[in-house]
Amino acid sequence: AATRAGESSRCSGPESPLNDRSRTPAERPGRSVPRTGSDSVPAASTGPAEQAFARGFQSLKQGRFADAAPELERAASLSPAGPLAEDAQFWSGVAWARAGRSKEAIQQFRSLLAAHPKTPRAGETAAALGWLLLRVQKVDEAERAFQRAMTERAVEVRESAQSGLDAVRAA
């Protein structure tokens, strides 16, 4: 599979949730994205967290990953207990990963799983975290993340986790 700069082909194959580049995040099957209005930045009547999320998510959809991640982090920090916090943290991790910034992506995914262990995105987050950890040679931790992802109901996440476990065994 073709890879982007800074990505290892072993960890960035089609089995990784980080590499669904054929569609924007909102178009991925079975995944919802909070809507704060239209696809543009919401009107001034929405709060700062929603505005930051909308700007960040728009940047993500446009492929401007390094611009998206800080906006999404800002959205999460402005409303850490609010309804956008989990999604903002998840998408900021995806944006950092797609920008080739594994350290920041790992930090976001770890933070999300620690703050929201029962998030509906736990399996997908764990699988993405596993691929990133494998990329930076943290094999034991990657294996634990993939094992956690194996409990996910979504078949595509379990398949990614199984591919990750196979890659760990081959490492």
Image (cartoon, rainbow, N blue to C red):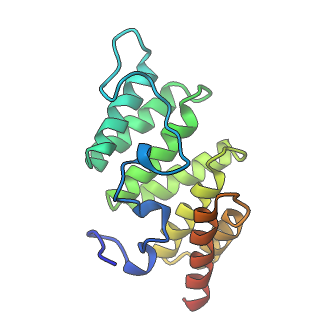
* Residue found at x 46% / y 27%: 35
User: Measured along the vertical axis of the image, is residue 35 above or below residue 139?
Assistant: above
User: Measured along the vertical axis of the image, is residue 82 above or below residue 64?
Assistant: above
Left or right: residue 154 versus residue 129 is right
Foreground residue, 23 or 164? 23
Left or right: residue 86 versus residue 16 is right
Image quarter (top left, top right, bottom left or bottom right) of the N terminus? bottom left
Left or right: residue 65 versus residue 77 is left
- What x and y, as percent, mark residue 52? 38, 28
Residue 164: quadrant of the picture: bottom right
Find the residue positioned furthest to the bottom.
170
* Residue found at x 64% / y 69%: 146
Left or right: residue 35 versus residue 38 is right
Residue 43: quadrant of the picture: top left
- What x and y, as percent, mark residue 13? 42, 74
- What x and y, as percent, mark residue 74? 42, 32
User: Measured along the vertical axis of the image, is residue 96 above or below residue 17?
Assistant: above
Residue 44: quadrant of the picture: top left
- What x and y, as percent, mark residue 82? 59, 25
* Residue found at x 37% / y 29%: 54
User: Measured along the vertical axis of the image, is residue 97 above or below residue 164?
Assistant: above
How many numbered badges does the structure rendering display?
A: 0
Foreground residue, 4 or 115? 4
Image quarter (top left, top right, bottom left or bottom right) of the C terminus? bottom right
